[in-house]
Image (tube, helix red, strand yellow):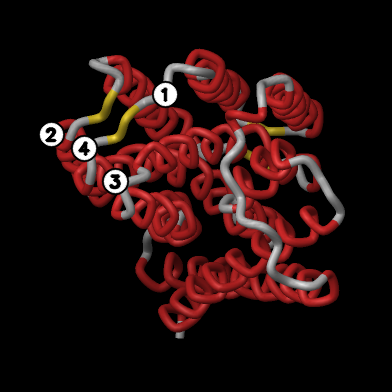
Amino acid sequence: MDIILILGGFVALLIGGEALVKGAVETAQRLRVSPMVIGLTLVGFGTSTPELLTSLQAALDGAPGIAVGNVVGSNIANILLIVGLSALIAPIAVGKHGFRQDMGFMIGATVLFMAIASTGHLGRFSATVLLLGLALFLVLAFRRSDADAPQLEAPKLSMPVALLYFIGGLLITLLGARFLVQGAIGLAEDMGISQTVIGLTIVAVGTSLPELVTSVLAARRGHSAVALGNIVGSNIFNILGILGATALVKPIPIPSQIVAYDNWVMLGASALLIGACVTQWRISRAEGAVMLGLYGAYVASLAV
């Protein structure tokens, strides 16, 4: 039954997240919101909606290992698994414009969270600091030229249909998050595995499905650079937005395993990504293969 809940949750998150983003983008375009604002918020962060709702649900259900492990595990999987797989399909060209700012924010957000996590607790004050960091990132991003915004197609849906997509997608995603968390908690109890490990692996990869689909499809279509921007934006939002919003609703303890081990893996993966980017300003297939191998080794280490 737990496996059925988890699989059902995955499917609902994927379908609901896609409908939610589509409806939100179409509604914003109908309201004549700037393409830059749409690109940086609804499109850039939209793929992180499953992580947000899943972490919130886990926190409310008293499962901090899943709430925090979901974010940390997603960030690790985003880099080592998704960027690695995308680079293996097609080498990723790295744009220099905005590189320092985006990568700087990703590393800064990671280090900030690690410092907070070392206290063993993520409270409302720390959550406010994280959310203020996200606000600063958005303000600086909005000051860039519209050349940084993704090219969006003209709206195809009427306003009522777009709103229906948005509301329906939100409800399906909420339901999927509920199923996924319930199934993950049950599976952890049945198998005698800690909720933290389940959060770092099954839940994290499951909620990263939108990023995985977006990045792999972009790579197959010859737009592999989209994969990198999608991952960096998602990782920033995961830490500053998701953990910030989750702890603002309900303060959460940070599992000691994440403080002692997984946070360092996340920082190492982020540093590896930057190193791969600045070598000839591209991520090669060989580097992608190394990332995938490291992700396999990481998952194996959790099973020990």
On the question of residue 246 being in view, the answer is yes
Number of the label disc, if any, that sits on residue 86:
3
Determine which quarter of the picture holds residue 169. bottom right
Rate crowding at label 2 as few (under 14), some (14 to 19) or many (20 or more) other CA atoms within 10 Å. Answer: few
The residue tagged 2 is 286
Q: Where residue 265 appears, x then y in whole percent?
A: 35, 30
> Nearest the camera: 99 or 32?
32
Q: CA distance from mark 3 to mark 1?
A: 16 Å
Q: Is residue 243 left or right of residue 286?
A: right
Residue at the front extreme of this rendering:
154
> Which residue is drawn at the image coordinates 40% and 73% (left, top)?
190
Number of the label disc, if any, that sits on residue 15:
none
Q: Where residue 272 appears, x then y in whole percent?
A: 30, 23
Type of amino acid under label 3: Ser
Rate crowding at label 4 as few (under 14), some (14 to 19) or many (20 or more) other CA atoms within 10 Å. Answer: many
Rate crowding at label 3 as few (under 14), some (14 to 19) or many (20 or more) other CA atoms within 10 Å. Answer: many
Determine which quarter of the picture holds residue 161. bottom right
Rate crowding at label 1 as few (under 14), some (14 to 19) or many (20 or more) other CA atoms within 10 Å. Answer: few
Q: Is residue 234 left or right of residue 265?
A: right
Q: CA distance from mark 4 to mark 1?
A: 17 Å
